[in-house]
Amino acid sequence: MFLIFGWRTKAQLLGTVLMACRVCGQPGNLLVVREVTRLSLFFIPLIPIRTKYVVRCANPYCGAGTGVSADEARRLLATGAGSTR
């Protein structure tokens, strides 16, 4: 009997926020992204293992991602201009 398992991470765009990047300092759009890693069995995703919230710079030269907490991601989306849900 074979047991095929693995994990996969999918990113979901929660919205955009207009502010300065924490890494490069350039003002512009930052993408608020939720990344969910799930354990899969026979290529069927079953159990979420880890959920991360990341703020990514939309600047093509930077593109840096900074990890934030779930509360901070919600706060950024609630107060940020240009939020898309």
Image (cartoon, helix red, strand yellow):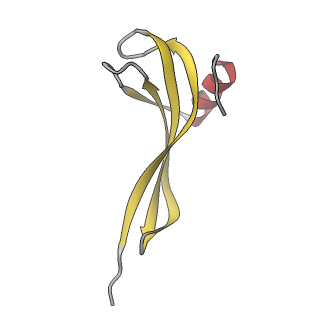
User: Would you identify the image quadrant in which residue 8 lies?
Assistant: bottom left
Question: Residue 56 at what x, y percent from top left?
Answer: 44, 27
Question: Residue 36 at what x, y percent from top left?
Answer: 49, 49
Q: Residue at x 41, y 9 (%)?
A: 26
Q: Residue at x 46, y 49 (%)?
A: 10
Q: Residue at x 52, y 64 (%)?
A: 47
Tally of marks: 0
Seen in the picture, residue 19 relative to 51 is either above or below; the reply is above
| Direction from residue 76 to residue 42 in the image, left or right | left
Q: Residue at x 42, y 22 (%)?
A: 57
Question: Residue 72 at what x, y percent from top left?
Answer: 58, 28
Question: Residue 52 at what x, y percent from top left?
Answer: 48, 42
**Quadrant where the C terminus is found in the figure:** top right
| Direction from residue 82 to residue 5 in the image, left or right | left
**Quadrant where the N terminus is found in the figure:** bottom left
**Farthest residue, direction bottom:** 1
The residue closer to the viewer here, 44 or 70, is: 44
Seen in the picture, residue 10 relative to 69 is either above or below; the reply is below
